[in-house]
Amino acid sequence: MGSAFGSIAVIKGAKNIPRCDHTYPIHIVDISPYHPLVLALILSVTMMNHTILYMFALMPPAPLTAEIHTKRLEFAANYRFVRALKPPVHITLYEPFRLGDGIAYAFEKDIRQMDRWARTRQPFEIELKDYGFFEHNEHPVLFIDVVKSPHLTDLHRTFPLELRKHLDMEKRTSPYRPHITIGYRDITVAAFPAIKEEYSLKKFSASFTCASFFLWRHDGSNWQVLHEFRFGDPIAPPPTLF
């Protein structure tokens, strides 16, 4: 019972069920013969199971985002793999994580204190160069490669240390390979050799000034920008979500 984003059991015959500001999938459960304490316990457990998905990302400016999104559309049209079209164009800074309701809203308020830390850092250039591949056994990945730089490496190293001041997160030890995804999840192993052969010959080159990072929250259907943390005090046009 339930969904990826939680559910609430609505109890047949129950009265005075507390109101909730959130929208959940509804499931009918008949426990009318049971004691009211059982009703309260089941309701509280199902509400606690609801979580919210977040992530931190770097986003190119709108013109470059549009250009990269065109590359994603071309790939989807040619190969019929479309999953990468759903999230906005981005470079992951901190991979998605889930928080329960009891933590999430306090986190959203407290995390804005990271504005002060962000302002101590300066904007830096990010260079995009050609295409790369993750050769996973089940779902390989095609991406635009990001040229590693001392500024980006330092941001990725220091960001989790600052984040853990606001949220009790486990330390992540996986290597950081910054990239912008063009195709993933629905790419099949059988189709991947042809994709790799084609995109190994393709070229891509662009750069942009990274002036901020973003906190995203998933609304159950799409990612939404919750907050922008700006470096220093630059003036830059806002990014565009696709």
Image (cartoon, helix red, strand yellow):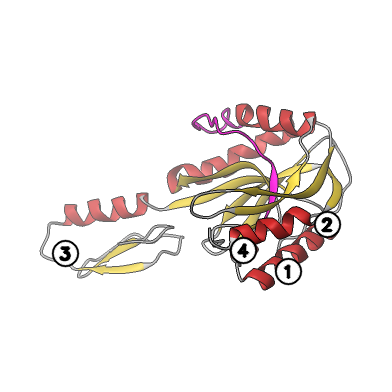
Residue 198: give its label.
none
**What residue is pinned by disc 4?**
86
Q: Residues within 10 Å of mark 4 (few under 14, many from 20)?
A: few
Q: Residues within 10 Å of mark 3 (few under 14, many from 20)?
A: some
Q: Quadrant of residue 72?
A: bottom right
Which span is picked out in magenta? 163-182
Relative depth, front residue between 41 and 97: 97
Residue identifier under label 1: 74
| Circles 1 and 3 in contact, beta carbons < 8 Å | no
Q: Is residue 231 left or right of residue 3?
A: right
Sequence order check: which comes first, mark 1 or mark 2?
A: 2
**Disc 3 and disc 4: Cα gap in Å?**
40 Å
- Residue 237 is situated, as x and y percent measured from the top left of the image, at 86, 53
The amino acid sitting under disc 4 is Lys
How far apart marks 1 and 2 lie (CA) works out to: 15 Å
Predominant secondary structure in magenta?
loop
Give yes or no for residue 172 being in the magenta stretch.
Answer: yes
**For residue 53, above or below residue 3:** above
Position above or below: 235 against 110: below
Mark 4–mark 1 Cα distance, whole angstroms, equals 14 Å
The residue depicted at 86 percent of the width and 47 percent of the height is 207
Quarter of the rendering occupied by the N terminus: bottom left
Q: Identify the mark nearer the N-term, 3 or 4.
A: 3
* Of callouts 1 and 3, the N-terminal one: 3
Q: Residue at x 57, y 53 (%)?
A: 140
Whether residues under marks 2 and 3 lie with C-beta atoms below 8 angstroms apart, the answer is no
Q: Amino acid at mark 2?
A: Leu
Q: Residue at x 41, y 64 (%)?
A: 24
State how far apart marks 2 and 4 are (Cα): 17 Å
Q: Which residue is mark 3?
A: 31
Residue under numbered circle 2: 64
**Mark closest to the chain's N terminus, 2 or 3:** 3
